[in-house]
Image (cartoon, helix red, strand yellow):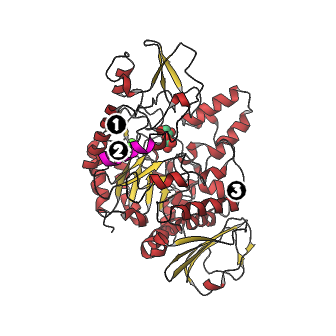
Amino acid sequence: MLNKEKRGWWKSAVFYQVYPKSFQDSNADGIGDLQGLISRLDYLEKLGVDGIWLSPVFASPQYDNGYDISDYRAIDPMFGDVSDMEELIAQAKKRGISIILDLVLNHSSSFHPWFLEAKKSRDNPYHDYYVWRDGEPDTPPNDMRATFGGSAWTYVPEIGQYYFHQFVPEQPDLNWENPAVRRELYDMIRFWVKKGAGGFRLDVIDQIAKEPDKFITGSGPKLHEFLRELSREAFVEEGLVTVGEAWSANVERAKLFSAPDGSEMSMVFQFEHICLAFEGEKWNPVKLNLPALKDCMARWQQGLANCGWNSLFLENHDLPRIVSVWGDEGEHRVASAKMLAIFLHGMQGTPYIYQGQELGMTNVRWPIENYDDIEIRNFYAERTAQGAAPQDVMAAIYARGRDNARTPMQWTTGENAGFTTGKPWLAVNENHAFINAEAALADENSVFYTYQKLIALRKELPVIAEGSFALVDRENSQVFAYRRDLEDAHLLVVCNFAKENVSFEIPAEFAGGKLLIANYGEVQEGCLRPFEAFMLLA
Ligand code: GLC
Ligand code: CA
């Protein structure tokens, strides 16, 4: 077990993201909850993860599945209460697992008491907790758009002002220029630190320093000043791990966000590799350009070496399933799921596994009525109103929609995949008949055990956590190969991204190396099978 008091313990750790609504229901209301999660901790201990990033479970009217918080110190009754959270933290700790809470500090819910006060009058003490501009009905201050469609400004006729929201109108942006707001948030974070939280994931943290008059959202000028204050005032316990979501991060900015002195955060989620799956807007998928992915990963691996820290991820609750994106949903599903795991887990950084990724779960295709996500529903309404053909809009949703990742966790072949004995809030993927945790645990060749092995290797071999990174055969457009070196340990990682046999020569230095992990068993001379992947240690 890791000593989590130690600074930097998370550098050889692997985390697991739980989307609580869809993980495990314990009381038959069709919604996952904290007691359900507690009942599955043994499974996560078996996988070997060091921490759980828990998507928001705070009180919320659920316009955006908990990313709209109406009380930061209360647990939403549908998930349990504060004593369930205390029990979760204690039970997880017994298994060497930290609980990483998801903080939504950029905005609150429009039902938060602060906002209910703020919109009463211009001189209400809470008015300045949010971002307001004077205006006339139907002429917003400018034409900034909100992320999930529509204007970023909503009018409150009673006071003749617009408030700013980067997401839906039920998610008003908090005014970080106001020191009282910052103090409230720091106090709240210290409350959860006292309860034993092991760290925090910081939702859209690069968007807190906004200047809407200048059209600035991501990375406003005061961002790093705010982050350093947040870190000083709120992340008060030694050993806390903090990871910020930052769509605007590039390598240079990430060096500040994840500076080794800990002045801001431990690491950020950056999305440059994720953005290679589409062109222009997120709804427009493109075929993978493998050399572009290689250049991107190499830039981050080399760019942050010794001066920052990477997070490593391919899935989360906002993204489609990676097997459906860069792998194969058909006969090579298992091989491709393992290949994508080996590809990522050989790199430097802290890997995050999204629930069900360790089973090779896949996307769903449903009629529009079956979807719940506000982004999907707004997108469908907006595009069909503009005249787009419904089948084209649906194709985009099948490929890119967020509900692909939010279908209930597949535990068994049984009814509702063992997720609930009630009616699930979102339908279960029918492929739970053959993709489920029970089957995976019973099969020593399952994707699950590939992840288990990769987690163990990161702890055993310092070259994985600490070694340098270099691409091998960069021009190869089907095989992603790279090496990691640390003193006299040399690691080669080879991943065939193609659905066919590909010829490949293992560099001479690694011939006769030790096979650490492989998705086809023994390595063949000169040829890789579809989605074949392995690691050799020389
Ligand atoms: C982040 C979350 C996403 C949410 C958005 C607004 O991107 O990951 O789920 O909708 O922030 O809070
Ligand atoms: Ca429940």
| Magenta-tinted stretch | 216-234
Q: CA distance from mark 1 to mark 2?
A: 9 Å
Q: Which residue occupies the foreground of this view, 511 or 502?
A: 511
Is 27 above or below relative to 169?
below
Disc number placed over residue 229 in the picture, else none:
2
In the image, taking residue 444 as reference, residue 531 lies left or right, namely: right
Horizontal and vertical percent position of residue 489: 50, 81
Q: CA distance from mark 1 to mark 3?
A: 42 Å
Q: Residues within 10 Å of mark 3 (few under 14, many from 20)?
A: some
Query: Residue at 40% across / 43% down in the picture?
Result: 225
Q: Amino acid at mark 2?
A: Glu
The mark closer to the camera, 1 or 2, is 2
**In what quadrant of the picture does the C terminus appear?**
bottom right
Is 77 above or below relative to 262?
above
Q: Are marks 1 and 2 in contact (CB under 8 Å)?
A: yes
Q: CA distance from mark 2 to mark 3?
A: 40 Å
Mark 2 residue's CB less than 8 Å from ligand 1: no
Earlier sequence position, callout 1 versus callout 3: 1
Q: Secondary structure at mark 2?
A: helix
Residue 323 falls inside the magenta stretch:
no
Q: Which residue is mark 1?
A: 182
Q: Secondary structure at mark 1?
A: helix
Earlier sequence position, callout 2 versus callout 3: 2
Taking the image as drawn, is residue 102 in sight?
no
Q: Which residue is mark 3?
A: 288
Horizontal and vertical percent position of residue 141: 55, 21
The mark closer to the camera, 1 or 3, is 1
